[in-house]
Image (spheres, helix red, strand yellow):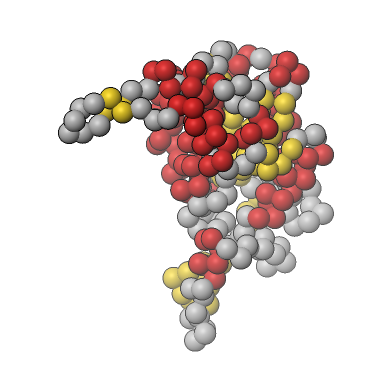
Amino acid sequence: MKFIRTVVVFDRGNLIESRQWAAMHDAYVNALRGVVHPPGNDQFVIRRKIRKITAAGMKSDQWLRNGVVPIKDQFLANLKSAGWHSEEPVASMQRSSSFQTHLNADMCLKEYPSRQDFRLDDKDWDAVIQERVGDFDFFTELDDGVRCVVEWETGNISSSHRSMNKLCLVLMAGFIDIGVVILPSRLLYAHITDRIGNWLELSPYLRLWQHAGQGTQRGMLAVTVVEHDQLTDDADVPFISQGKDGRSAEGATKLL
């Protein structure tokens, strides 16, 4: 798989110059470059999308595309062999009750029409984060205690927004130091499961998440974009198998 670029959305603490970030970036980019198709190949070669055929033998308005689950599975295996942990809960990263310290002291909401101050229950925020933001795809802790998280985003576009929001939240809370979301490029997106997260649709919101970084004492948020090495019309190259839920399942029901 081809690494296209990494865009740092915000960096509080000049982590971009740290050796820990350099090591983390090298590790997950090497894991990305190790993703191949078809199995046994030395590159990531995918079939170009084609029109689905109806029961009457006519081209439909639906497309036969590549799935995404086997891609993530390869990336997972590559990162695990490099010492990363998968499906890591937020609770394992917390060191102190830091959300209240970092954020809630400055958070004042208003209730309307009374215009009275409205404050969320500060003492419960750590528990809320741990229970409701979900696990992270990949986690590692480097020397000097630098905690790094990678979210692989080939779910739907809403899932990509949730991942970015979740990373902003735990960065503001001080639970992690570096958070990365990995997304398909515009060119790769066109040939894999429809309406999944992708760079083209997410990039207009980067300024919003950049401003979220102002509430972070120390931390970095970045987005990495990936793409296929080669696109082919060769029928001997199989389409990557699709999952059985989400956008894949919805697309399968529209075949006929």
Instruction: Evaluate whether residue 29 shows in this view.
Output: no
**Is 225 in front, or is 44?**
225
Left or right side of 50 for 214: left
Q: Residue placed farthest to the left in the image?
A: 113
Q: Residue 202 location, x and y as percent? A: 45, 40
Left or right side of 6 for 145: right
The residue under the point 55% across, 21% down is: 98
The residue under the point 48% across, 69% down is: 62
Q: Is residue 34 above or below residue 239?
A: above
Q: Residue 177 location, x and y as percent? A: 61, 23
Query: Which quadrant of the structure image shows residue 145?
Result: top right
Q: Residue 140 location, x and y as percent? A: 72, 30
Q: Is residue 174 above or below residue 192?
A: above
Query: Which quadrant of the structure image shows residue 219?
Result: top right
Left or right side of 142 for 98: left
Q: Quadrant of the N terminus?
A: top right
**Is 59 in front, or is 156?**
156
Q: Is residue 51 above or below residue 46?
A: below
**Is 250 in front, or is 98?**
98
The residue under the point 50% across, 58% down is: 194
